[in-house]
Amino acid sequence: MTITPPSRGPAGTVGARQGRRHDHDALSQAAQEYLLALRVMAVDGRHVTAAQVGRHLGVSTQAASEMFRRLTADGLVSQADGRELVLTDAGRAAADGIFRRHALLEWLLTAVVGLGWAESDEEAARLQGAISPRVETRLDEMLGHPETCPHGNPIDAATARRRPSGELLSKMEAGTRATVYRITEEAEEDPALLSYLEARALTPGAHITVLARSESLDSLTLDGPRGRATLGLRPASLIHVLPGDADPGLFHRVPTAGI
């Protein structure tokens, strides 16, 4: 998922205050971007600081710290051990809501409009703060109530808890058969990687066989739907797979009847 730098000026203030409803109408676009960035960066238990989020968003540490002070006052973020940022339950719910709108837009742009993964990610980032709850509900219905984004990442924490975690592609040994399960949020930050995976049809649900894995060459070669593909071990570590032939029900398909 592409995180665009937050806008400057009045948009940098948070419209919601503690005790008010933290929906996307009550949060500024900048606040939504910070919450989403923290959600993406804190996956797998990673420790995240304001300085790291600032670098990620392309803003100063001072600007990021000021925004997180506001989000802390709003009850959306807490600070552990002095510097580590953690989403509160309310903050996680708000960030999940932002991610959900982004995911619905990505499904719309890829499955209906016909944009590529990288393009749809960028366009969804522009649109995610503008759709109303009514449109969001209608999109969800039309798209068949997806539980993940097109890259396979769970839309919310509850969905993540009931789905398998998968295994890292980078750890698969030669001769292993597997099913591409999800392309992590961190991988979504690399448009070139997204475009390569899409071009080779290495998308959630694709069946692959690992042909070779080399630590010394820092590479992994596999056979996929469109023949051989080669990945560095670092990019391969951003892809989760399930051994063998996974349950097709884990992979969302947009229904054509409602479109």
Image (tube, rainbow, N blue to C red):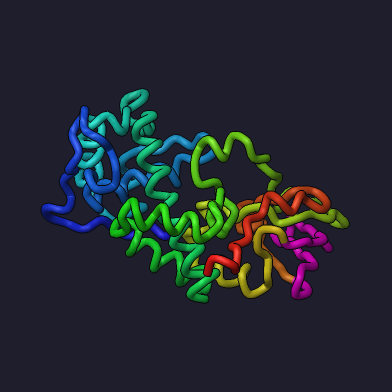
**Camera-nearest residue between 167 and 83:** 167
Q: Residue furthest right?
A: 175
Q: Residue furthest front?
A: 257
**Camera-nearest residue between 129 and 59:** 129
In the rendered image, residue 246 lying in the magenta stretch gets the answer: no
- Give how far across and how far down residue 82 sits, in percent: 31, 25
Residue visible at 31% across and 32% down in the picture: 77
- Give how far across and how far down residue 175 sits, in percent: 88, 57
Magenta part of the chain: 206-228
Residue visible at 39% across and 45% down in the picture: 97
Say if 102 sits above or below 161 in the image.
below
Q: Is residue 202 left or right of residue 143?
A: right
Q: Is residue 1 visible?
A: no
**Camera-nearest residue between 6 and 63:** 6
Q: Main secondary structure of the magenta part?
A: strand
- Give how far across and how far down residue 198 sits, in percent: 61, 70
Question: Where on the picture, by quarter, is residue 17?
Answer: top left
Q: Is residue 87 visible?
A: yes
Residue visible at 35% across and 35% down in the picture: 91
- Give how far across and how far down residue 239 sits, in percent: 64, 54
Question: Where on the picture, by quarter, is residue 214?
Answer: bottom right
Say if 76 sits above or below 188 in the image.
above
In the rendered image, residue 211 lying in the magenta stretch gets the answer: yes
Q: Is residue 108 left or right of residue 179?
A: left
